[in-house]
Image (tube, helix red, strand yellow):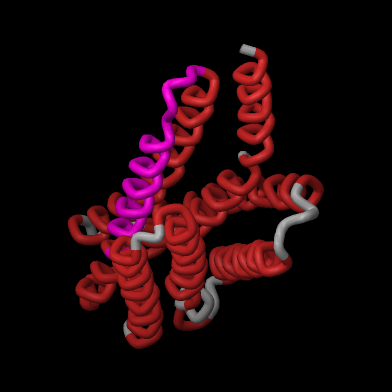
Amino acid sequence: MNPAEIAHGPFLIGVAINILLYGIMVTQMYLYYSTYKSDHLWVKLFVAFLFLADTVNTLFDFVYIYQSLVNHFVFATDPVMTGIISGSVQLFFAWRIYVLTKNWLVVLAVVLLSVAGFLGSVGATIGVRIVPVFVQFQKFEVIVIIWLAGEACADVIITTALVLHLRNQKSGFPPTDDVIDRVIRLTMQTGLLTSLWATTDLVLYLTLTSGLHLLFNVPLAKLYTNSLMSSLNARGGWNRILSSADQVGDSK
C-alpha cells in the first residue's frame, strides 16, 4: 500500500466530511445571529471566535490535501486547532453546568479533562512536526490517548450532568415534561456523538496503521462547533413550547 493510499485517502474523505459540516456550521451561525440578537456580547464573541477557528481549521486541511506542503507543515496544525475548538466548547458547557447546578465537582472534572485534552492536542501537534510521517504517528500514542480520551471523557460527564439536571426538572405536567424530554434527547445526541466520534478516532489510531483514523479526526472540530450551535439555536423552539405549556397550565 503506497503512502498516498495510507494517509491521503482517509484524509481526503475526512476533509469532505469537514467541509459538509462547515456548511452546516455557516447555517447555524446565520440562524444564531439573526435570532438571538439580545444574547450577551461575550456569547456572541465566543461564537464568532469558534467560527473563525473553524474556518482556519477548514482552510488548513483543504490547503494540505490540495498541495501537500513540505513536511506536512499544515497538517501539523490540525490537532491543536481541534483541541482549541473542542476545549472552548467544553469549557462553555462547564460554565452552563455551573449556572444550572452549582456543582463545582462536576465543573472541575470537565475543566481538568478539557485542559488535558487541549494539552494533548498541543503535544500531538509537536509530535507531528517532529515525526512528519503518517506511518510513524504511533510513536506518540500516549499524547494522543491523553488528547482524545480527555475529550471523550469530558463529553460523557457534560452529557450525564446535563441529562440528570434536566430529569430533575420534570414536574409531572405532560406538555412541560415533553419539552424537557426533547432537550434531553438533543443533549444526549450531541454529547454522545462527539464522545463516540473521538473514541472511534482513538481506537482506530491505536489499532491500525493505515491512517483510517484521519477520516474521524479531521471532522472532529466541526462536530464540536455544531453541537454548541445546535444547543444555542434550539432555545427558541423550547421557549415557545414552554410558553404554550404555561398558558395551557394557567387555563386549567
Residue at image x 37%, y 41%?
163
Q: Indicate the quadrant containing the C terminus: top left, top right, bottom left or bottom right.
A: top right
* Residue 168 lies in the magenta stretch: yes
Q: Residue 211: horizontal and vertical position, in percent?
A: 33, 59
Which portion, as a residue range, is magenta?
A: 150-174
Total numbered labels: 0
Q: Residue 74: horizontal and vertical position, in percent?
A: 53, 76
Residue 59 visible to an observer of this rendering: no
Residue at image x 40%, y 54%?
101
Residue at image x 39%, y 74%?
118
Which residue occupies the foreground of this view, 144 or 17?
144
Which residue occupies the foreground of this view, 9 or 74?
74
Up-down relation of residue 249 to residue 2 (above or below): above
* Residue 127 lies in the magenta stretch: no
Q: Quadrant of residue 238?
A: top right
Which secondary structure class fits the magenta region best? helix
Residue at image x 49%, y 76%?
77
Which residue occupies the foreground of this view, 43 or 148?
43
Q: Residue 222: horizontal and vertical position, in percent?
A: 54, 55
Up-down relation of residue 230 to residue 59 (above or below): above
Residue 188 visible to an observer of this rendering: yes
Up-down relation of residue 1 to residue 175 (above or below): below
